[in-house]
Amino acid sequence: MSEVYDVIIIGGGAGGLSAGVYCARGKMKTLVLESSSNTGGQCAKTSELENYPGIVESTGPGLMNMFRAHCDKFGVEFQRAQVTGLALDSDGFHKRVTTRDGQTLMAKSVIIGTGANPRVLGIKGEREFTAKGVSYCATCDADFYEDLDIIVVGSGNTAVEESVFLTKFVNSVRMVVLHDEGVLDADRTAQEQAFANDKISFIWNSCVDEICGDELVNGVKIKNLKTGEITDEACDGVFMFVGTVPMTDFLKDTIELSKGGYIVVDDKQETSMPGVFAAGDVCDKFLRQVVTAAGDGAVAAVAADRYVQEEEHWSESVLDAEKDVLVAFWSPVDPKSLELMPHLEALAADKGLRLVTMDTYKSRNIADRYEVSQIPTVIRFSQGEPASRLEAPAADQLEKLV
């Protein structure tokens, strides 16, 4: 087998770099794979950043450079690569990560932090003025437009809710809507809030044909979809709320994704594939911000570390054991488990067997692997395979195991 990493982190944005710090500081052999020439993800494309706690004022690239330096301090390895596939190895533990250039990398755990990109409509001027008057995040950039006039593109829940939020800062919001007058794609509550807000007005049956400006945005060209007429509208900024696109194409048919293509995770950031975790904007979540991505990365890293330790302990103490082993799947807060444990210890001592205890809450992956649904459940392993099993046994039944 080629070199095996304790963890491979796919993506070098805020979530991936945060995970890198925690993993490497925890003495895990850590590799970050990043498809771009620079790390930092979407945050590295943000000109100003004022809402990361403890960092009163910074640029996105500046903050991400600090994240990267923190990774370097603890010895995180970085490699530029486009990941094309992820699979569980035949041993059920190791993961195979394949890249576009033909590499196959092996890891005991994987953290996915590939992020999500704002959906780009391709409007003339959109890319040129990104971060120069074109924004995709009201929470990030609203205060930069205080007392100014802005255009919002979109009419779904996000567009309407963010427009209402923006009115706390800006002078006016004009929403450009594809539909007939009075028709929005948002839910009724969001619509009522928007229609009742004096700072919000609507340009119906229209789309933005071009975003204009010199060094910064100073206006847009609006096209009426019914008449074809194009009019000029002055503005100081354009917020695009037409959805995001998660970077999960390489994961289709591999792990569970939401309808929108985001990764479904649990409270430990674990995906449907054991030992594979996700962090940041690629997750199916409520808020996508640098600070939440960093938090996800920390959780995923600690969970990955514990997963690897647990699996290695299981292999060493049970699967590779020369003698038979009794494994008790239990809970330290379950009365039946506590009552049975002294009898199990006595049986193991009498028969010269090793007793291994597995807390089913902490070791859910292993419990599920052996279809443990009741506690306590005791399984005797011989040469790494289950040889006998008792579910919720009484003390006088334990002899049946041996």
Image: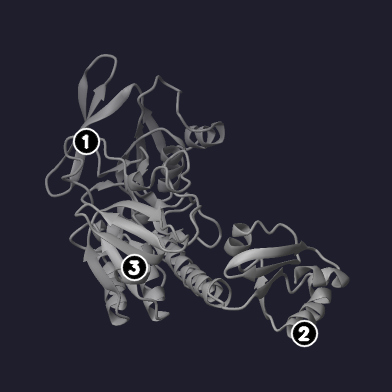
How far apart in space, not on screen, are marks 3 and 2 (Cα)?
51 Å
How far apart in space, not on screen, are marks 2 and 1 (Cα)?
74 Å
**Residue 14 visible in the current orientation:** no
Q: Is residue 36 above or below residue 159?
A: below
Q: Is residue 399 above or below residue 196?
A: below
In which image quadrant can residue 293 be found? bottom left
- Left of 183 or right of it: where is 100? left
- Of residues 49 and 122, which is closer to you in this image? 122
Q: Is residue 171 above or below residue 279?
A: above
Residue 42 position within the rendered picture, expressed as x and y whole percent measured from the top left = 29, 56
**Residue 242 disc label:** none
Residue depicted at x 29% and y 79%: 75
**Element under label 3?**
helix
Residue 54 position within the rendered picture, expressed as x and y whole percent measured from the top left = 40, 74
- Of residues 260 and 172, which is closer to you in this image? 260
User: Mark 1 — residue?
Assistant: 122
Sooner in the amino-acid sequence: mark 3 or mark 1 = 3
Q: Name which residue type carries label 1.
A: Gly
Sooner in the amino-acid sequence: mark 3 or mark 2 = 3
Sooner in the amino-acid sequence: mark 2 or mark 1 = 1
User: Mark 2 — residue?
Assistant: 350
Residue density around tag 3, few if under 14, some if 14–19, many if 20 or more, within 10 Å: many
Q: Name which residue type carries label 3.
A: Leu
User: Mark 3 — residue?
Assistant: 17
- Left of 137 or right of it: where is 350? right
Nearer the observer, disc 2 or disc 1? 2
- Direction left: furthest residue: 214
- Of residues 49 and 79, which is closer to you in this image? 79
- Left of 10 or right of it: where is 286? right
